[in-house]
Structure formats: C-alpha cells, structure tokens
Amino acid sequence: MSLIPPAVSQHSTAGQPQSSLQATLEQAYQLQQEGKIELAIERLEAELARIPQNPNQTQFKERVSLAMAIAEFCVAAGDSEKASAILATEFNLAKATFQKIKAEGSDDDKRLAFRGLVQLRDYYTQIGLIGKPAPGLAVKEWINGPPVTLAELKGRVVLLEFWATWCKPCEQMFPKLKVLYDQYASQGLVILALTRYFLAYGGTEDSQAKELELIREFVKKHGIEFPVGISEDESTQTAYGATALPIITLLDRQSVVRYFALATEDERFKQALETSLSEAV
C-alpha cells in the first residue's frame, strides 16, 4: 500500500529544545530504518497513552501528531485497518476537544485545532481510498477542453492535482507536472488539475463568474495546458481527503486509487507512477 506520509513534525519550532514528542518521533523513525517497525509503533502508542483524552491545546497538537505517525507506521507495516481504527478514534476525541477550544480558545487556537481535526479526517479518508475505485469528480466548469469523467479515462493513468490560485506551492507544482506530462503522456498519462470556488464559495453566479475569470487568467499566465476542473464546493476535495493543498492523487488504468503525494519528487510516488504506467490496459 502506498500513501502520503503525514507531516507529523509540523508543530515543532526551530530553536526550541527538543520536546518529548520530537524525541519519540525521531526514535520511531530510527527504529523503522533498523527494521523494527513494530517496536516503533509500540513506542508511539506508549507516548500517546500518556496524553489525556481531554487535552489542553498543546496536548491536543501532540495527540494529533502521534495519531498521524502511528497510522503512517501501521500503513507501512501493512496494517491499514489498525491505522484507520486509530484515526477514527482520535477524530472522535478531537471533535470533542475542538468544541471546547472553539468555546474557550483564541482565534489562533481555534484555527490550529480545526487544522488538526481536518488532518485526521483527511488521512483517514486517504487510507480508506487506497486500492479502491476513485470517487467521481463533481466539476462545474472545465478549462482547456470539454467535460471529462473518470469513466471515460479508464485505460489511462490519471494524475489528479488539487490546487488553488492563492496556493504558492501549487503554483510551483505546475512546471513539475508539465515535465511529467511531457515525459509520460505517450505512455498514457493524463493530468487533471482540480480546484474549486474559494472566494465565491456559496456566492452568487456573478461572484463565481469573477472567480472563474481569475482562474482562467492564472491558467493562461502559467501556461497550464492540461484540463482544469472547477468544482462549486469542497465535496470532491473532501471525497479524496485533499483539503490541504497541493495534493497529488494517482489513479491506475482501472481508475483505482494507488497513491497520494505532496510532491512529484517523492520516490514512492515515482515508483507507483512507473508501475501504473507499465501495467496492461
């Protein structure tokens, strides 16, 4: 099973002494490199067990990071069911904590707590999709071509890129995708760049028309030539666990989800892409 590795160390701050969480995560990754992944999972689970299930803001961030790490290690160990169970449990706990922070915390606290909640939800979704038929695309407008469905693309390897006009890493991703397309299009690679209305979310047709023009200008400015799909809401992103941007989703020739990645440089993504392209139609 291939899956995007979560950014479990994102809450650490440069210049600060190493925390117990950071030390545990580093130790776990070292154990994984030594081939002792089950021991790594045990260490992470022990660290998680010491944190209250009704945590404060700092402890909440630690629980999220540990849950994501444990799930990642379980996937690597071939136990996706355990990974999903852990994420489901932590998501339910996180919902209760989020309501408390929402009522009592600062705006920054609320944003961080919501981000943690979404991370757990999205990773749970991604794990559940690997090896399964890809969800359909709820796209309202298409740029650079007529409407297309995944069913029509069966027999091709499809790379979905979830992006937004305001996302700088997304902007930096497009030249890399063009390189991939130029290299592999003859072997059956199709790239669909999927975004949605953000500024005009839930707005009028006039506001959507203005954002559509903004997206068209962005596509033209950056020389994006593959199809660009624009959804009216977040339903497609949610279905793919692709709230954070950019996220790449790789579908094989049978429209089965094979991999999630943050970057084209990911070696496991490259391997999954080449494997998918080599498979018979």
Image (cartoon, grey):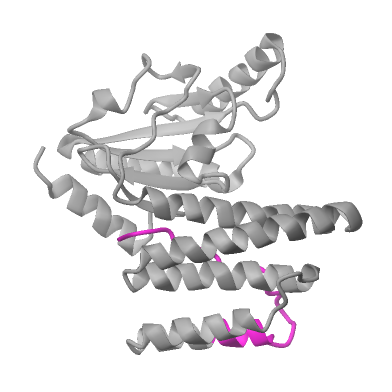
Asked if residue 192 can be seen in this view, the reply is yes
Q: Is residue 18 left or right of residue 263?
A: right
Query: Residue placed at 45% from the left, 68% from the top?
Result: 72
In the rendered image, residue 6, in percent from the top left (x then y), is placed at: 51, 63
Question: Which region shows up in magenta?
Answer: 1-26
Locate residue 60 relative to residue 92 in the image: left or right: right
Name the image quarter holding residue 67: bottom right
User: At 54% from the left edge and 81% from the top edge, which residue is drawn?
Assistant: 45
User: Could you say where residue 14 lies in the image, as x and y percent from the top left?
Assistant: 70, 77
Image position, residue 151 (x, y; %): 27, 26
Q: 95 above or below 209? A: below
Task: Report the residue at 59% width, 55% height from top.
Answer: 119
Foreground residue among 91 and 206: 91
Residue 9 visible, this angle: no
Q: Is residue 246 above or below residue 75?
A: above
Furthest residue in direction top, as rendered: 206
Which is the main secondary structure of the residues drawn in magenta? loop
Q: Residue at x 79, y 53 (%)?
A: 99
**In which image quadrant can residue 166 be found?**
top right
The question of residue 78 being in magenta is answered with: no
Q: Quadrant of the N terminus?
A: bottom left
